[in-house]
Image: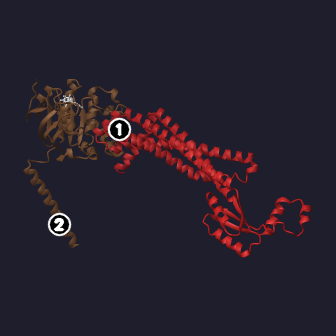
Chain colours: A red, B brown
Amino acid sequence: MNSFSNNLFYSIKQGILSIKRNSRFSLASIGTMMASLFLFGIFYCVVVNFTYIVKNAETNVGITIFFDAGISKAKIDDIGEKIRARDEVESCTFISADEAWEQFQTDYFGRDKDVLETFGNDNPLEESSSYEVFLADVTKQKELVAYIESLDGVRQVNSSESIAEGLTSFNRLLSYVSGAIMLILMGVSVFLISTTVNMGISVRREEIGIMKLIGATDFFIRAPFIVEGMIIGLIGSVLPLGIVFIMYKKVVAYIISKFTILSDYLVFMKAEDIFLVLVPLSMLIGLGIGFAGSFFTVKKHLKV
Amino acid sequence: MEVNNYKNKLSLDKNKTLIVKELVHNHERGGARPAIVMKNVSKTYKSNSTPAIMNISFRVERGEFVFIVGPSGSGKSTILRLLMKEIEPSQGGIYVDGKDTTKLKRHQIPYLRRKLGVVFQDFRLLKNRNVFDNVAFAQRVIGADTKTIKRRVPSVLSIVGILEKHQKFPRQLSGGEQQRVALARAIVNDPMILLCDEPTGNLDPKNSWEIMALLDEINQKGTTVIVVTHNMDIVNAMHKRVITINKGVLISDQKEGGYRDE
Ligand SMILES: Nc1ncnc2c1ncn2[C@@H]1O[C@H](COP(=O)(O)OP(=O)(O)O)[C@@H](O)[C@H]1O
Ligand SMILES: [Mg+2]
């Protein structure tokens, strides 16, 4: 073993000892850390799911395009090509008058055979062949609708603008609010860890002085404090992850059982998929906050 | 094969010329590289108007034993603190082991201090560690492995005569015993120079003599020893070199000096 790894093991041991020695402040730091990362976990789950639900809803938010009366098939094909050429368009499907009528029949008169018979072989939707367009990016809907309306041969464009816009802006607001709350919480965590480490340093001022006199490097003096901060951060991240995981499964199951009517729209992400990202992310944030909180505190004290 | 032999011979010759060069160099400078050189050093503390020391110059060869004496407040501790680079001189040059310490960068200071063992009047032991760990700590600092520490620490504890108390904490020890621990910590890394600031200042005469005898013994084994002290009896009895400071000025430097009060 070289002197670096000797020092590293020693530093880790000292860092753990120091957490025990200042147990009260360490617990306070771990507590704040847990609170921050617990909320972070919840926000993350909500935001990710909301985005997911919005994405899902977007695929159901389509645009329907009807044509001028007596339009030729070639003209319709031409319009279709122009629409498909747009980047924001995911798909553009032609629905003939016959298909539309069939769909209409099953949707509205499924059980009422008598009404259907009055139409005989006539198709009341003869002039209602259409394109059904789905967007890859729902934020571009307004733009696209304006473009399509300007095309020659287009009679009418139906779109549910309000739903798409509402979903998008709510999603954005949610990310901003949760981002802001997270930033504040992390600031508080950094502050508390820095206070904990500060306590440890004041208690060990004399010790640090002696260490310097016998030739300790700044790294050697600093390392235990940084290890201390990082361990606090790591412990503070693991427990909330567990709690959020269990909560997530319970809450999702509850919502699904209570709101069966909305089951088409309320599609939640699998807990495993969310936590594949959330676990390393939370641990990294915990380690990062612990590192930052102690690194800068010790740096201030070593500058004598 | 032949080429290799030639190369070996060449590097041998090169080594030889290097050694000869160093010998000549040392001879012309009057011996090996001096342990300490202070050249016209002055120090004025920021909060003071008068300098703590003025224009101090002296030179200590390797293996010497030197007392620094003088009344309280004359600047003795200031000299030691300058040597440790705890403070910077206002003027002058300070050389330890031939290197100009005023030119050292911040990150190089720990390596200067590893050449110096330090002992203070107030012992400065770590209160929450036992005797063994206090000494082991100095080895940790330089990155020694546990095996070395387990071998080396008992050995120095037995040199200073405190091995049987290795599990005691500082508060469980007498002043003389604490100073032995501090001395063990100072020598555990085998420093080139041992700096002692009034090491017997808090000790009774018997313990004072024992600590001085230990310092002498350490010096006999080749370590350069600098001792700041007030203890006239010991200085006069030991017949070592004595540097006398008064009001920040070096007033005498005697080869086998004594210490007159006043
Ligand atoms: N940190 C300091 N700040 C200001 N003045 C100091 C400081 N340390 C020592 N002095 C002053 O410098 C002078 C020499 O002090 P010192 O070297 O400690 O003397 P000695 O060790 O011989 O008793 C004294 O006048 C003392 O008051
Ligand atoms: Mg002094």
Residue type marked 2: Leu
Nearest the camera: B87 or B225? B87
Residue type marked 1: His
Which of the numbered marks, if any, corresponds to residue A301?
1
- Mark 2 lies on a secondary structure that is helix
Label 1: how many Cα within 10 Å (few below 14, some 14–19, many 20+): some
Nearest the camera: A203 or A181? A181
The residue sitting at 73% across, 52% down in the picture is A263
Please identify the quarter of the rendering in which residue B110 is found: top left
Please identify the quarter of the rendering in which residue A156 is found: bottom right
Residue B99 percent coordinates (x, y): 18, 47
Answer yes or no: are tags 2 and 1 on the same subunit. Answer: no
Residue B87 percent coordinates (x, y): 23, 38
Q: Is residue A94 visible?
A: yes
Label 2: how many Cα within 10 Å (few below 14, some 14–19, many 20+): few
Quadrant of the picture in which ligand 2 is shown: top left
Left or right of residue B61, residue B200 in this image: right
- Mark 1 lies on a secondary structure that is helix
Residue A255 percent coordinates (x, y): 71, 46
Which of the numbered marks, if any, corresponds to residue B97?
none
For disc 1, the chain is: A
Residue A1 percent coordinates (x, y): 37, 51
For disc 2, the chain is: B
The residue sitting at 67% across, 55% down in the picture is A161
> Decide: marks 2, 1 in contact (CB < 8 A)?
no
- Which corner quadrant holds the C terminus of chain A? top left
Left or right of residue A261, residue B188 in this image: left
The residue sitting at 13% across, 34% down in the picture is B54
Q: Is residue B214 visible?
A: no
Mark 1: is the Cβ under 8 angstroms from ligand 1?
no
Which of the numbered marks, if any, corresponds to residue B10?
2
